Image (cartoon, rainbow, N blue to C red):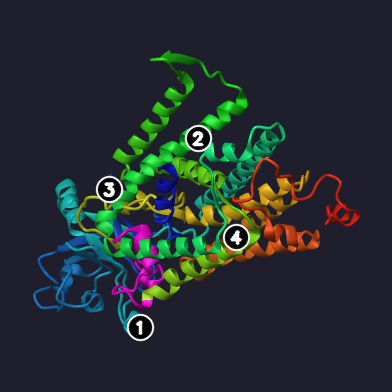
Amino acid sequence: MEEVVRVVLLLAIFSTSQVNCQEAILRISKGSEYKEFCIVHNHSWTPLSPTLDAAVQYPLVNLTSSLLCNASGVSPDVVKGKAVVVMRGDCTFSEKALVAQNLGATTLLIASNKSLITPSANDSEYPKVQIPLALMRYRDFVEAQQVFGEGMQVKLYAPPYAKIDPSIAVILLISVLTVSLGGFWSGASERDRLNSVALGGGGGDNKGDSGELSLYSPLKVVIFVAMMCGMLVLMYFFYNILVYIIIAIFCFASASALFSCIDAVMEKCGCSTLSVSVQGKNVSVRSLLLAAVCISIAVVWGVYRNEDRWIWILQDLLGIAFCLNFMKTISLSNFKICVILLSLLLLYDVFFVFITPFFTKNGVSIMVQVALGPDASGEKTQGNMVEIPAEPQAPSEKLPVVMRVPRFSAWAQNLCGMQFSILGYGDIIVPGLLVAYCSRFDVWINSSKKIYFVSCCIAYLLGMILTFAVMLLSGMGQPALLYLVPFTLITSAVVAGCRGEMKQFWAGTTYEVLDSTREPLLSEGRTGRSVEAERC
């Protein structure tokens, strides 16, 4: 049952990316009192000041009774040298801005009862507008009126937006550590199994009891990838129903994975396994307490999963445990299977990220829409647009298939909503399965330097760095497997070829022939050529 849950959840794991936004801050004050609100602007209009001190303060004139599509009924003396706030509707943003500018206004705020979107216009319209323009929530203006009344002063400023946020380093650290630990754990488990075989413990039975599974058939790999494609398409069309099923499965699978991870650490540390007898059966007190803690963590996440301020910590903890346990229990039997699986998933990733936007109605890729939820706006314009609800809304459900770390430099996140750097579990698990295979192969050939494992981990690190670099330079999300798969596969193949072990590395071992008489592929007494290759 647990293996089935893992497979089903993996079918819902997709890579995703980060989104750039164009939020700014509106500071409304009267005397010594002030309050700040979220506004949305466009860099193509007149730029806003990067700091509060450098921003110019203007009196605010309330023209929300007007749409300002023309100058009728508005006296220039009333708005000259002041900031004006008008209602959204009936004409374009540029038309309102030109009317306000001709009347002598210094700043235009457009109050909206609809979602705030990045104000845009034809390229020919931008040079005509010489005053700052931004959208604000109408409810924020009403709140400011209630607090300050008449005589309000305003400042608009947009602190520099750091493209290279420290959260990227945290995401990179999480991914590399998870892949490395998962690969190391897989290799350690294989070594324990071989030692059990040497002592007559029965390797095949031990593997079956531990719940480990091995992919050894190319046909099964193809079927698995086809199921992933089908699952993704189903999630796209029936998201509102299937998202709750995936959330429930994640709670169960992640609690089980967290139990396995912590239990393995406690076992390694030699923690006591006090047992009590219940109806003739011995029950481990440690296991009971640990199970209660893991289930409680999963339940807390399930209940508070939409609390962005802090729940990301639990989601990342459960996600790390899930990825580690998956890499340890699901093994690829040889390099041929690794090449087939990773290559097919690379094509899958690229197709659903880059190709599907040409077929969807809103121009958003199926991968991004499913990973970020139906409210995944901004991607349709490569991250140059932002959409913020005008009224408080119930949080939309999102699939728990990504690592999330708040952007530390997101200065307006408390006003406009938290921004996150995210990485899909698939970008950890898929290359991680190859890293785990390399770790097991090091065990089979008795490599004291763990050359395959170490080199594959370094390749994964370089692939992740390239992924983030391309994303930052292009300003749009990237399918990480596009870089991770070539880096890890080519590096592993080069190491095997350099050491003269490609034949063994390609063939590996299979679950079907693995039995108690299995010996390492290369014994300690290797030929002179193989010994020399150890230095490669």
Where is residue 59 shown, x and y percent of the image? 24, 59
For the residues bearing labels 1 and 4, Cβ distance under 8 angstroms: no
Q: Are marks 2 and 4 in contact (CB under 8 Å)?
A: no
- Amino acid type of the residue that numbered disc 2 sits on in the rendered structure: Ser
Q: Residue furthest right?
A: 528
Q: Earlier in the sequence, mark 1 or mark 3?
A: 3
Sequence-first tag of 2 and 1: 1
Relative image position of residue 520 (x, y in whole percent): 74, 46
The residue carrying pointer 2 sits among few (fewer than 14), some (14 to 19) or many (20 or more) residues within 10 Å by Cα, namely many
Whichever of callouts 3 and 2 sits on the residue coming sooner in the sequence is 3
Q: CA distance from mark 3 to mark 2?
A: 49 Å
Badge 2 is on which residue? 260
Q: Is residue 432 above or below residue 336?
A: above
Q: Label 3, on which residue?
A: 35
Three-letter residue code for mark 3: Lys
- Mark 2 and mark 1: Cα distance apart in space: 57 Å
Element on which disc 4 rests:
helix
Q: Residues within 10 Å of mark 1 (few under 14, many from 20)?
A: few
Instruction: Give the residue at mark 1.
Output: 123
Helix, strand or loop at mark 1: loop
Nearer the N terminus, badge 2 or badge 4? 2
Q: State the residue position of label 4.
A: 338
Q: Specify the amino acid type for callout 1.
A: Asp
Residue 434 within the magenta-colored segment of the rendering: no
**Quarter containing the N terminus:** top left
